[in-house]
Amino acid sequence: MYLALRVGSGGGAHFLRLAEPLSRLDGHVRVLWEGLAAVSVLAVLGAAIVSYFLARRHAHPLLELTRLAGAFARGDFAQRSLLQGKGEMATLARALNEMADSLSGLVARVARDKEELQTIMAR
């Protein structure tokens, strides 16, 4: 690479000349690109790690509610969700807890009615 600048004015003008081999500049550019690539890889890796933990944190309430729904499907209405808060997951958890209370009462009532009917039929 070559650069020439005029220094001074009038009849006593001088020129400043600079020269640098391109191979040396290519080496500096290569080092900069390698550094940029390394920083980019570290940034992507860091973002992936942060994303993983955030996804797990946000998926945990959903997994708990799925477990709770599975317990209800098996007839275990004693299970309750402990989720608290104001978000959609907490609202769903409260609704599932209320549903479990209601279903538990209905199942107990049906059992009592069945018992009464069996007693009546046995006479």
Image (tube, rainbow, N blue to C red):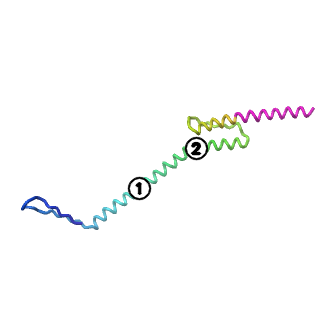
Q: Is residue 13 left or right of 80 when viewed as pictured? A: left
Residue 93 drawn at (x, y percent): 62, 37
| Residue farthest along the front direction in this orientation | 10
The region drawn magenta spans: 101-123
Numbered mark located on residue 40 in the image: 1
* Picture residue at 32% right of the left edge, 62% below the top: 29
Q: Amino acid at mark 1?
A: Ser
* Picture residue at 30% right of the left edge, 65% below the top: 26
| Residue farthest along the left direction in this orientation | 11
Residue 121 drawn at (x, y percent): 90, 34
Q: Which numbered disc flags the more N-terminal residue, 2 or 1? A: 1
Q: Is residue 32 left or right of 6 when viewed as pictured? A: right
Q: Quadrant of the C terminus?
A: top right
* Residue toward you, 89 or 82: 89
- Residue named by callout 2: 60
Crowd band around label 1 with a 10 angstrom C-alpha radius: few (<14), some (14–19), many (20+): few
Q: Is residue 71 left or right of 61 when viewed as pictured? A: right
* Residue toward you, 60 or 14: 14
Q: Quadrant of the N terminus?
A: bottom left
Between the C-alphas of marks 2 and 1, the distance is 30 Å
Residue 106 drawn at (x, y percent): 75, 34
